[in-house]
Amino acid sequence: MKKIRDFFNQGGLVIFVFGRILAGIPIVIALSLLVFLATQALPGDAAVAYLANTATPERLEAIRQQLHLNDPIWLQYFNWAKDALRFDFGTTLTGETEVTTILADRIKNTLILMGASGIIAIPLSIVIGVYAAVRRGKLFDNVTSLFTLILAALPEFVVAIFTVFLLATNVFQIFPAVAFVDPGTLAWAHPNVLVLPALTLILAVTPYVSRIMRGSMIEVMESEYIQMARLKGLSERTVIVRHALPNAIAPTIQVIALQLAWLAGGVVVVEAVFAYPGIGTVMIDSVKGRDLPIVQAITLMIATLYVVLNILADIGTILSTPRLRTKYARKNDTSDVFAAMDGDE
Amino acid sequence: MTKKMKPKSQLRVLFGLTFKQRYAKIGAALVGVVIAVAAFGPLFAPHTFDEFIDAPNAGRSDQLLLGADYLGRDVWTRFLCGGRSIIGLSFTSTILGVGLGLFIGLFAASAKPRTDSLIMRINDILLAFPQIVFVLLVVSGFGTSILLIAVTVGFTHAPRTARIIRAAAAEVMERDFIKAAIAVGEKRHRIIISELLPNVTSPLLVEFGLRMTYSIGLVAAVSFLGLGLQPPAADWGLMINENRGSMTVQPWAVLTPIFAIAVFTIGINFITDSFAKVAIGIDRKGKE
């Protein structure tokens, strides 16, 4: 009987996961509408804005053709969204190259940078948070809470320039201030150029995650089952690692996802400081050149990433919290029937 | 009947407790110094901000406290004149954004459940855009304008503030004095203004401090990226951008504005954190 129930419980979980993914679809559609409305459908004329002083009637007409500005607005959106689904964001206004061609390597570089930062920042902040919680009120806790408070306040470009000052130009000259990557190669072929941008992002993300981790850990450490584990005579190490940590991580998952999503925005400014060849620098250049198709594509991708990370965080939270796991698994009726038959609860 | 808390006296107590903490005192001093520099600095500027007075990147001397910038303008003068724009713009956008977010949050919390969830769904969609990305998106469509940047930065704060305020107000809505007010047929705007608002002031003030630090970061970043104030304006963000290339020879032109921005944001964060600990007793949830 138990096996059958477990099977259906899992079914409930699968249904939840699929439901959560499906619920993401209308959100992404709404995002695409917003991106489109905030740019192309503006009262101003994108073609006039783009050409500025160099506008001649012929060139204006050419750009309008390219952006399909002469079509009714709903048709413009429909065509744009239809192409975007196939990762076809049209051609740029300047070079008339495919937006996708320009972005392909840049996306990889940005993901490498975000990945490198996340892989270091998240375990690091969990360790700092846990250790600060364990040593609550002691020197380590006080020092890290002061530093995290300061770092959390600083805008990321301030941190970025400070790392340049300290490690690239004025004080030490260890790492390059400008992230030069040979065209045709990816950033991980030049680990040197990754150091300072990644360091900046790590310094930006770590304070938040470690503070939440600390708070959550303190709460868990004060709970009864931790007292129980101690009373059983388990070593402090076992109590922390096996009993407290797994329970303290669950509430942190949402914050971690939030920070990873934040990285997608933070990366834009940080890339600009280091001229790192990712989507951030392209975005800035395109905003300056009023190259709408690229700006639209990048914005939509970053916003979609946020939605995806949130879905993953929801699933992660449920999987890592036994109480929620069963609650959602029970959502399908059959398992309730089984529960009633078993006579438990 | 504990119908209304007295917001003024309660706030005064909270502020009193806040500024008893060491970090809050330090924070207030830091913020005070930077605001004083921004407000009164131009009065003490030895030159005009766009005057060429020496060779580009000239070093420090008796006449030039901090040397000359990449075009040969006085760094000290430009520093003294460059704070007004960034602090003024960030303050404006924070007021706009937190105000709008407050309105949306209170409106949603006091609305029918269906309206409430519809508003918050739309709100969640807006959260998907990182603030800087949305600002850049709007700048690419409308072009750079100071007013536009302040409004857009404010607009990106609104959904984030709205979520915090709605959560706080939704809790208040469950309390007896609200049920009593609804039962005696009090009008909705009366409930919002005289019942809900006074009971969300603590999260509101925390949110304001937090949003202010983000505003400074965003406004300065936009100028730093060359999309905000345009040359020859004196602005801390723009100064950093302009002199970044010659940082090895003339670090002061970059370090002074960076330092001022850092001191200001750290100061605000110290005060906000101390207030949050006193008023709410929790750490906040993370950068969005």
Image (tube, coloured by chain):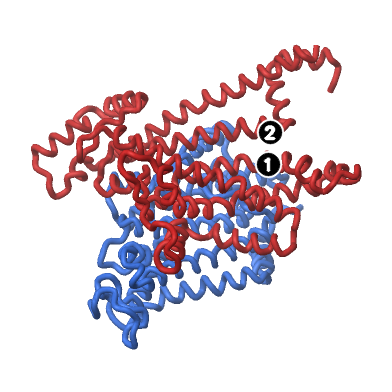
Chain colours: A red, B blue
Disc 2 to disc 1: CB gap under 8 Å: yes
Q: Secondary structure at mark 2?
A: helix
Q: Position of residue A294 (x, y in %)?
A: 30, 38
Q: Position of residue B68 (x, y in %)?
A: 30, 76
Quarter of the rendering containing residue A279? top left
- Residue at image point 74% right, 16% down: A335
Chain letter for mark 1, please.
A
Where is A312 relative to A264, above or below?
Answer: above
- Tell me the residue that label 2 is attached to: A320
Q: Is residue A2 left or right of residue B155?
A: right
Left or right: residue A18 versus residue A57 is: right
Subunit ID for the residue under disc 2: A
Sequence-first tag of 2 and 1: 1
User: Between residues B184 and B261, which one lies in front from this camera angle?
Assistant: B261
Query: Residue, x 52% and y 26% (percent of image)?
Result: A23
Residue, disc 1: A249
The residue furthest bottom is B62
Q: How many marks?
A: 2
Q: Residues within 10 Å of mark 2 (few under 14, many from 20)?
A: some
